[in-house]
Image (cartoon, grey):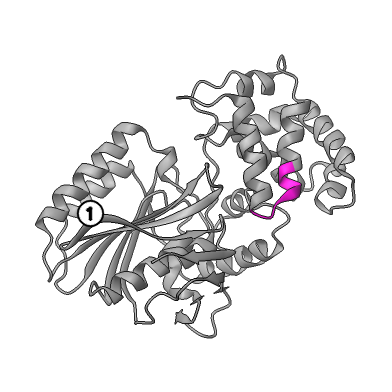
Amino acid sequence: MTTSVKEAFANQVDYCRANGAPLTATICKAVFDRLDPQSALGKRVFGWTGDPLKDVVPLRVAGGIHALHLANDEPQLAPVYAAQLTRAEVEEAIGAVIAERQEAILPWLDGPPQTNEAGRSAGLMAGLKWLAGEGYGPKFELIEIGSSGGINLMIDRFRIELGGAAQGPADSPVRLAPKWTGNAPPDVPVEIVSTTGCDRAPIGIGTREGQVKLAAYVWPEMTERMARLEAVFAFAEDDPPQVVQADAADFVEARLAAPQEEGVTRVLMHSLVWQYLPPETQARIRLAMKEAGAKATPQRPLAWVELEGDRTILKHRLHVTAWPGKAERVELARAHAHGGWMEWLA
């Protein structure tokens, strides 16, 4: 069932508040409350033809507004993002901006938010640690769909601390240490042999345009995320991740058909991507993984690591499936949307 625009905005407000972003919640609420349905922007938003919740329409608009601020192109936004205004004053300022700057915001509705967040590598690594502890690994070949700028393809360059289990260079400028509850995942070594990713519209993380676009989708309250993003940009200057432009199902089918090195577990991984894929693409990927899983052997295992949002509980869920032997999908953890905390269930 398709969600209404009103429900999509209400859910996004709740989601932001539940994940420590009250300013972003206020901005999203102001957009809905102040947007003129008869304006060009209002007609696009209120006349949305898809599912506005799955398509994350509120964050598309919020990203466009944030981009104006990051470009120093809208002075009245400065006190908004500096947290100098009351909630009523924020709503008034946002109302003025969406009325006056529609032409600048409209292009942000043309594609899904690129929330390419390094913090989600903590959840993905937790999945890899669990796999290694279950006998899959320690060597992994990572295949990622919806890679955006490829930040999570740099997972082996981050220092990741998971409730006592650690991975990655101790001196890495990107340190991920989510607040942890529950047992720690197995403290076993993980070796990333190779990484490859795809996206329908890859972002050039080494370009200024790409960096601004990624930064615009960072919730402004989260200064730690922005600092982490700057560190990731520095990584990319020396050795940018390789992301190819491709349909997710085409990419998965091609990668699964490629020769697999013995002793290396092939892993399909993704984070906050699945909801954007058309049903037919999802079905093709499920079928491809099922068929490849049936052919997997202890010498050439296959796994699927999913870190995706659940709008009903306002959290992310970490699921893992592995072949041979563990073809049942297992929920390992629940997590903050950007890696701030993790509740280990396994």
Q: Is residue 227 left or right of residue 310?
A: right
The range drawn in magenta is 19-25
Residue beneath disc 1: 255
Farthest residue in the top direction?
38
Query: Circle 1: is it few (<14), some (14-19), or many (20+) Cα within 10 Å?
Result: some
Q: Name the amino acid type tagged 1.
A: Arg
* Residue 276 location, quadrant: top left
Q: Is residue 275 magenta?
A: no
Q: Looking at the picture, tell me which residue is in the foreground, 26 or 241.
A: 26
What is the secondary structure assignment of the residue under circle 1? helix
Quadrant placement of the C terminus: bottom left
Q: Is residue 136 above or below residue 271?
A: below
Task: Evaluate whether residue 240 shows in this view.
Answer: no
Quadrant placement of the N terminus: top left
Residue at horizontal 13%, vertical 60%? 296
Q: Is residue 327 left or right of residue 67?
A: left
Residue at horizontal 33%, vertical 44%? 248
Residue at horizontal 17%, vertical 74%? 263
Q: Is residue 1 left or right of residue 75?
A: left
Q: Position of residue 28 (x, y in %)?
A: 70, 37
Q: Position of residue 278 (x, y in %)?
A: 37, 33
Q: Is residue 295 left or right of residue 22?
A: left
Q: Position of residue 96 (x, y in %)?
A: 84, 30
Q: Position of residue 257 (x, y in %)?
A: 15, 53
What is the tally of numbered marks visible in this picture?
1
Q: Is residue 24 magenta?
A: yes
* Residue 75 location, quadrant: top right
Q: Is residue 185 above or below residue 114?
A: below
Q: Is residue 210 above or below residue 121?
A: above
Farthest residue in the bottom direction?
170
